[in-house]
Amino acid sequence: MNNNTTSTNRRDTLISKDGTIINYYITGSGPGLILIHGVLSMPGNYSELASLLGENFTVYSIERRGRGLSGPQGDNYSLLKECEDVEALQKQTQASYLFGHSYGGLIALEAGRNNKTFKKIAVYEPAVIVDAAIDMSWAPAYQKYMAKKKYLDAFAVFSIATGPGNAQKTPLWLMKIMLPFFVKKTERMQMYNMLPANLIEHQEVADKNNTYQNYKEVSAMVLLMSGGKSGLGWVDKAIKTLAQVLPASKLMKFTKLDHFGPDKTGPAEIARELKDYFK
């Protein structure tokens, strides 16, 4: 594929198994490390993390299908498609390390099943569901607001239902006032564009409820990372269950970080530990 290079950014593309074009960004030099972002986000949200990791590794930040310069999710979207994209990127780059955040962490674990090419995997609060711990009751209201193009309402409904305990107690009218203060307009507009993909991806998460035994098939060492201030009940369940199921794993908790440690609240701290782990 054609490689576009500037002084600050490099990118390339690949063609996945189903013919979808997948864009990815390249940062730094050294052993290859694939970075998989979460829902309602893009590689640019992880630019600080990628830049820091790029001091020691060649970081390949995949732009997941359905956003940016990559092709659409497609009518037959599934986690399997995401895994095919990651596999295609690994084959093109020969990367042997893999990091995923939230939904990206779920993709990383799925991609690591029966895959001997990854020497080490790290995940931060992967969206692994144990006993239906992630609530999907918000979906009907979310879809209703989306149909009416009331994107702030849809975003607010989602933020209340999937946020920490204090967010879940917030009335819709108040959340709609608060979000513009906490999320900059440019980032909010980016998120609005990804709201349809967000619902589809969360449905994939829900469909994987209690399938954690599958991760016995992951042969690589897995670093299970989490934040002490996430306030998300499903996270501890997921981490504890994975620690019991994975053949080889180690735990690391960042006491001062929340769910957005890798992209917002602690990329430097996350990068420092990932450098040490992957070296």
Image (tube, rainbow, N blue to C red):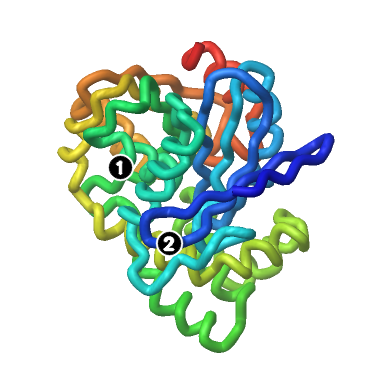
Near-viewer residue (167 or 84) = 84
**Image position of 102 (left or right of 178):** left
Near-viewer residue (125 or 52) = 52
Residue extending farthest to the right is 7
Crowding at mark 1 (Cα within 10 Å: few <14, some 14-19, many 20+): many
- Identify the residue at horizontal 47%, vertical 50% (top origin): 165
On the question of residue 166 being in view, the answer is no
The label shown at residue 21 is none
Q: What residue is pinned by disc 2? A: 19
In the figure, 245 relative to 136: above or below? above
Near-viewer residue (72 or 168) = 72
Q: Position of residue 233 (x, y in %)?
A: 37, 44
Secondary structure category for the residue under label 1: helix
Q: Which amino acid type is marked by label 2?
A: Gly
On the question of residue 123 being in view, the answer is yes
Q: Position of residue 20 (x, y in %)?
A: 46, 61
In the figure, 142 relative to 166: above or below? below
**Image position of 113 (left or right of 145):** left
Q: Which of marks 2 and 1 is in front?
A: 2
What is the total number of numbered labels drawn onto the structure image?
2
- Identify the residue at horizontal 19%, vertical 48% (top origin): 210
Q: Where is residue 161 in the image (x, y as percent from the top left)?
A: 45, 61
Residue extending farthest to the bottom is 148
- Identify the residue at horizontal 43%, vertical 61% (top origin): 19
In the figure, 204 relative to 106: above or below? below
Q: Mark 1 and mark 2 in contact (Cβ < 8 Å)?
A: no
Crowding at mark 2 (Cα within 10 Å: few <14, some 14-19, many 20+): few
Q: What residue is pinned by disc 1? A: 110
Answer with mark 2 or mark 1, whichever residue precedes in sequence. 2
Q: Position of residue 94 (x, y in %)?
A: 46, 29
- Identify the residue at horizontal 22%, vertical 34% (top origin): 114
